Each structure stands twice: as C-alpha cells, then as structure tokens.
Image (tube, grey):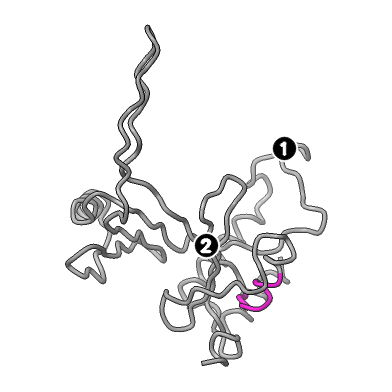
Amino acid sequence: MEHIIAKLLRDFENGFMNRRQLIQSLALAATAAVPGAALAQSPAAAPVPPHGPAFKTVELDHISYQVKDYRVTRDFYADLMGMEVANDNGRNQCELKFGNSLLLARNRRQPAEAPASPAPSGAAPSRPAPTSLVDHIAYRVYSWDTEQVREELVRRGLAKTTLRPDTGGGPNYSSFHVSDPDGFNLQISGWAGPNDSVNTKK
C-alpha cells in the first residue's frame, strides 16, 4: 500500500495528475486495500498475463458518439444527466463533461442506410443497419510516456513503429489508437510530462 501511495504522490509532483485526480486515486487505493472490498475470483476467472499488465488504467478519458443530430444528444444528456456542455462549435459537435471525463457528441460522418434484409418465413424480421454508433472509447493510464507506450504496442503486435500519437486532446495530451480483439477502436491516452517526446519535439 505504501509503494502505491508513494507512486501516486510522485505522479502528482511530476505533473501527471492534478490535485483532484490524486485525491480520487488515493480514495480508490484505500478502498481496494480494505479486506473483502474486491469480489473473490478464481484464478481461472481472472487470468494474469505472463509478464503482468502493461499499463494501469486510472479512469475513463472520453466516449465519442457519432449520432444523427448532435444537438439532440447534447440536450438529452445535459437535461437528463446534468452534463456540462462545452466547446460546442454550433455546427456538428460538442463536448459533454462529467467529472474528469466527457462524452464527445458529433454528427455521424457516413450514415449507414442499408435496408433490412428479408426474413425467412415465420422468422422475426432482421434489424436494419444501425444509424448511430460509439466509434471509440478512450482510457487514460498512469505515468504516460509516449515512446514507451508506442514500444509496448509495437511489441504486442498492435501497431507499427510508424504509429503517430494523437495529440488532439489539448496541451500535454498524447494518445494512440489501436484495434481490440473485436475490431473496436481503442484509444489509450495520458498526460505527457515536460520531457515527453510530444513536448520535446515541438
């Protein structure tokens, strides 16, 4: 427990998390340390990777929705869930903030309007092609280092060495997009420190 707290404090001092994130992480660590707090699982139910996990996920970074009309999605989540509307460009997208995370709502780029296929006699009709979708989900990890993350993704066969970081999330933000086993767009992100390559190469 002491080494976890020490690591969190180092991350805070090095600028990898803000005060609010530090407090939340300390609270989570304390909860996890309470006996019986975690559900018991058999080794078969929770296999451990041979070399241990590559990253430590800390929170949901953002969810990106492609929707028919972002304004409808904006008003729904703001009204029902109390999300804070931010960076609304008035044309096709906005951010909906909640806690340290956000939902990015934007008009879909290429509508999928394929008709429903005919159903066999006596069978329920097949569903029409979806017209809205979650196009990716981003997860933020501890102690971000752009080059180390890239090397790990390459080592695992998830990316080529030419994979470039996505830094569109603002100053000191860095991330990579890869595909998970089901083909979903997985974005792994973090806050880059002052000596990170995305800052030193600018």
Coordinates of residue 3 in the picture (x, y in percent): 73, 71
To which residue does mark 1 refer? 45
Left or right relative to 139: residue 52: right
Amino acid type, residue under disc 1 in the picture: Ala
Amino acid type, residue under disc 2 in the picture: Gln
Look at 71% across and 63% down and name the residue there: 54
- Relative to 67, is 190 above or below? below
Q: Secondary structure at mark 1?
A: loop
Mark closest to the chain's N terminus, 1 or 2: 1
* Main SS category, magenta section: helix
What span is colored magenta in the figure? 143-151
Number of the label disc, if any, that sits on residue 187:
2
Coordinates of residue 102 in the picture (x, y in percent): 37, 62
State the residue in front, 36 or 116: 116
- Relative to 80, is 25 above or below? below
Coordinates of residue 202 in the picture (x, y in percent): 51, 92
- Relative to 50, is 142 above or below? below
Look at 65% across and 53% down and name the residue there: 34
